[in-house]
Amino acid sequence: MAIAADIRGTVFKNGSAVLLARVVGPEGDPVATTDISSLNYSVLEIDPCDPDALTPVAGHDNVQLTVGDVFYDSLQTGGPWSVDATGYNFLHEVDVSGDEAFPVAGARYLVRYEAVPVSGQKTVFRFLVTCI
């Protein structure tokens, strides 16, 4: 079983974010585009007094992504990945051309992805970002 952990980072107020991850399935193998039937993401502002209170950011709530636009069928190495030599298979640049995703400096945001596989259970992975 893969270890679940939020990926932490920092974003600029009213800026975009390029989010990278190595997403694996239940057996620990990297997920490929043919493994996923649909993928959605949400940007949620976290209430500092109640971490369970999440407010969706307008324009970034349950947005469907094209799997082939954000997942690779093989692990990628080199820039911008600097975590390890193994690589990443997921890269998403949050589109802020229509709606700001990170509008409040000092706020923390949860960027949550839900991948529905061709078969089996959904995969959830998240980024916890602080806006400066």
Image: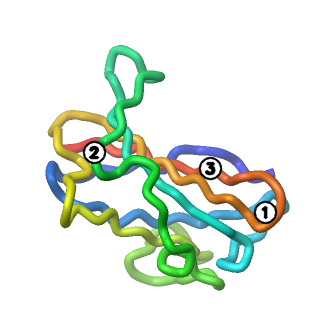
Cα–Cα gap, marks 2 and 3? 21 Å
Image height of 5 relative to 12, above or below: above
| Residue that protrudes farthest toward the top in the picture | 49
Q: Secondary structure at mark 2?
A: loop
- Depth check, mark 2 against mark 1: the one in front is 2
Q: Determine the residue positioned at 64% across, 84% down.
A: 74
- Work out which quarter of the rendered image holds the C terminus and state it: top left
Q: Residue 27 lies in what quarter of the image?
A: bottom right
Q: Secondary structure at mark 1?
A: loop
Q: Which dot marks residue 70?
A: none
Cα–Cα gap, marks 3 and 1? 14 Å
Type of amino acid under label 1: Gly
Q: Is residue 104 left or right of residue 108?
A: left
The residue that mark 3 highlights is 124
Q: Is residue 106 left or right of residue 27?
A: left
Q: Determine crowd level at label 3: few under 14, some 14-19, many 20+ residues with C-alpha closer than 10 A.
A: some
Type of amino acid under label 2: Ala
Can residue 82 be seen in the rendering of this structure? yes
Q: Determine the residue positioned at 34% across, 15% down.
A: 49
Q: Determine crowd level at label 1: few under 14, some 14-19, many 20+ residues with C-alpha closer than 10 A.
A: few
The residue that mark 2 highlights is 58
Q: Position of residue 50 (x, y in %)?
A: 40, 16
Q: Earlier in the sequence, mark 2 or mark 1?
A: 1
Q: Determine crowd level at label 2: few under 14, some 14-19, many 20+ residues with C-alpha closer than 10 A.
A: few
Q: Determine the residue positioned at 30% across, 61% down.
A: 17
The residue that mark 1 highlights is 28
Q: Position of residue 71 (x, y in %)?
A: 56, 76
Q: Earlier in the sequence, mark 2 or mark 3?
A: 2
